[in-house]
Image (cartoon, rainbow, N blue to C red):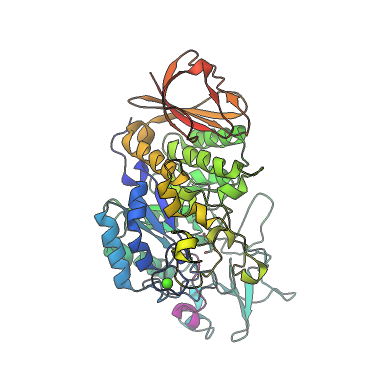
Amino acid sequence: MPTDIHWWQRGAIYQIYPRSFADSNGDGIGDLPGITAHLDHIRSLGVEALWLSPFYPSPMADFGYDVADYTDVDPIFGTLADFDRLLEEAHSRDVRVVVDWVPNHSSDQHPWFIESRSSRDNPKRDWYVWRDAARSGGPPNRWQSAFQAVGPAWTFDETTRQYYLNSFTPQQPDLNWDNPEVEAAMHDVLRFWLDRGVDGFRMDVTQKIAKDPELRDNEPGLRHDEDWQPTIHHRIRRIRAVIDEYDDRMVVGEVYLRDLRRVVAYLNTGDELNLAHNFVFVHLPWHAGEMRASVDEFERLAEGAAWPAWFLANHDHPRVASRFEDEPGTGARRARVAAMLTVAMRGTPFVYQGEELGLPDAEIPPSRVVDVDGRDPERAPIPWRRPSEAGPGAGFTSGEPWLPLVAEAERLCVESQEEDPDSTLNFVRRLLRLRAERATLQGGSQRSLDAGPRLFCFMREGDERLLVALNFTSREAPLDLREEQGGRAAVELSTHPGRALSVVDLRDLVLEADEGMILRLS
Ligand code: GLC
Ligand code: CA
């Protein structure tokens, strides 16, 4: 068993969406001082690091993923001094800090783009992707924006009468990574934050920074607008080389591809990404067999080299407690099983803010919708305190929150859950503490076991043997193991508060509806 694992392999990374975490000045929008004020909450979870979604100056067309200056802080979030203080306070609590890096596109308000669009012979013209209309008129090709509501990935610009490429909103023009000056400038952005002391980066839409330079239309089975081979891998290697100029840093890529072979290709060589978010996994249904098959496929493709990253929620996907709820109550229980799954597997678990509370999606009335792509419900602010005492902002803000909070803030807020030993918050703390204490959970091997159709079961083996058994159904399920028959095991943790932590005979073990357990084999 490897004993020399890195910090980014050891424990969980906690994602903060700054607009929705904590507001320090009553304007209804979360900010950096708000995060600093709540670092003890993050520390109490026992995570290794936090990842901050963008806090850079931005017109907020995509709520910060449209960056107008890569090396500063938007006044709505604070100042660079606030960032330095957050970094220092996090480090003093042994929590590392990962920042979002958005290399594929800038804001249309970035000075680079303002210059680029000003004339066809501007020195920055080629920093973005400009093309004439198609011969028949209209956009240069059929590439589409990732946002359905946007449609074609091209916007016509009157000033110079050409189209520019935008893989997301028209306010997010794609940078031209075929231009070495762009690549060098974006490397300098990395160095700016590395010099300030950040521990790593989450790289936004990694797969998009190399496209077919001939801009050919996509074909069945071959996309020309992303993941362009082999260029993309050369570019990632050069990014990794910049990060490796510094000690002990890491880069996790958002590799939004639905083919695991292509995802693992960013990891197996050892000199590209340290971690890649797995979007095949995030789109699976709540089904033991499908989860197992996907995990096994990753392990097979990883060939012992690639280190997995597991997540089931972020700021772009409906929350687990809502997505997997099929009858009232199942979502809240499944949120705990999901946490146990991601934390107990070999790999790095990512926890999205609010998952430790088992938050569901918020209901957003049509008049409050602000996102182009339907992602407001999972971005609702964190309820810190009981609205009955702290007012309708639930301790998130003393003002008007930018998005409505979840309906059940009174019961689900941090304050209420702190006081209840059986709460999801206290369960997640126990779960992460177990991961922090057990080398086998961090670096041990993993192998799936046959345990009947309702359960996903796997063994973690290192200096001890830990059995993880997860019931993916809302019915009781006997542990139907082909091996380990008759063995005895100690229950280390269950998602169900009523389960006694005692020694059991595996032959007699029946999991309750929506229950997950970690057992130590004797
Ligand atoms: C990533 C982000 C998402 C954003 C998009 C464009 O997918 O997670 O929030 O809209 O990139 O930057
Ligand atoms: Ca604020």
Residue 470 appears in the picture as rendered: yes
Q: Is 297 or 517 nearer to us in this picture?
A: 517
Q: Judge from the rendering whether residue 470 lies leftward or rightward of residue 97; answer left or right.
A: right
Residue 274 appears in the picture as rendered: no
Quadrant location of the N terminus?
top left
Instruction: Identify which residue is drawn at 51% across, 52% down.
Output: 411
Numbered circles on residues, count: 0
Task: Give the answer, above or below, for where 121 lies relative to 316.
Answer: below
Residue 197: name its quadrant: bottom left
Residue 421: name its quadrant: top left
Residue placed furthest toward the top: 486
| Residue 309 percent coordinates (x, y) | 45, 44
Q: Is 64 or 38 nearer to us in this picture?
A: 38
Q: Is residue 111 magenta?
A: yes
Task: Give the answer, above or below, for where 75 lies relative to 454.
Answer: below
| Residue 240 percent coordinates (x, y) | 37, 54
Q: Which residues are magenta?
A: 102-114
Q: Is residue 471 magenta?
A: no
Instruction: Identify which residue is drawn at 42% across, 66% down.
Output: 183
Residue placed furthest toward the left: 92
Q: Judge from the rendering whether residue 454 lies leftward or rightward of residue 206; answer left or right.
A: right
Q: Is 347 or 49 nearer to us in this picture?
A: 49
Q: Is 328 or 344 nearer to us in this picture?
A: 328
Residue placed furthest toward the right: 136
